[in-house]
Amino acid sequence: MTAYEQFDPIFKNVHRDIERYIEQSGKVEKRKDGFLVYHGYYEAQRLMVDRYLSEKAYEPLVRYFRGWNWEVGDNDFLLDLTARLKSDGERSLLETLWGGVISKRRKMYREMKRLRAEDPNLVPLGQFDEARELLISSLEQLRNLAVEFEQTEAAEKLTRRIAGLADD
């Protein structure tokens, strides 16, 4: 039986389950300065996310991923969780997940806009445009979900926000 098969997640805290799995697998190294190094973190993370998804432990996954740095783009974790939540009709969790993504991206966009207003050389135009496009794509994702879940008012509000950013 593999370490993965022997491991029993608590399905409440993704990060802690990842660490527990690595510890149980014997892949933790304590450095001289006392700092713990968790070897194989990405592999363990993928395993735990898959396990949480298979158990439909969505709320802890949404909490975990809301804390991620989504300012630079999407990844398979976000897209996999979104697809699963969507197929299971978890509208509230989708809104929570994408609300967190949008919040981080909006904060980054606003900060870049502020810096460019002070001095256009502080943030290259290409980088600013990328941040705006990433925010727009996130708002479009949430709008499309609102349409699918027949949330007409929310979809219209998001359409106006997108249009405002496109003109910015």
Image (tube, grey):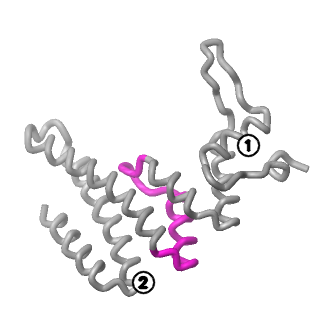
Q: Residue furthest left?
A: 118
Identify the image quadrant of residue 133.
Answer: bottom left
What is the quadrant of residue 150 in the picture? bottom left
In the picture of the structure, the residue carrying the numbered disc 2 is 149
- Magenta part of the chain: 69-91
- Residue type (three-letter) at the residue carrying disc 2: Phe
Q: Is residue 73 above or below residue 55?
A: above
Read off the residue under disc 1. Answer: 21
Which residue sits furthest top? 32
Residue at horizontal 15 percent and vertical 40 percent from the top: 115
Name the residue: 40% across, 63% down: 98
Could you tell which of marks 1 and 2 lies nearer the N-terminus? 1
Position in image of residue 82 (x %, y %) = 51, 68
| Residue 74 within the magenta-colored segment of the rendering | yes
Q: Callout 1: 10 Å neighbours few (<14), some, many (20+)? A: many
Label the magenta part by its dominant secondary structure: helix
Give the quarter of the image for residue 117. top left
Residue 108, which numbered label?
Answer: none
Image coordinates of residue 120 in percent, x first then y, are 11, 41
* Quarter in which the C terminus is drawn: bottom left
In the rendering, at what x and y percent does residue 11 appear? 67, 55
Q: Picture coordinates of residue 77 (x, y %)?
A: 55, 57
Amino acid found under the numbered disc labelled 1: Tyr
Is residue 8 a member of the stretch shown in magenta? no
Give the SS element for disc 2: loop
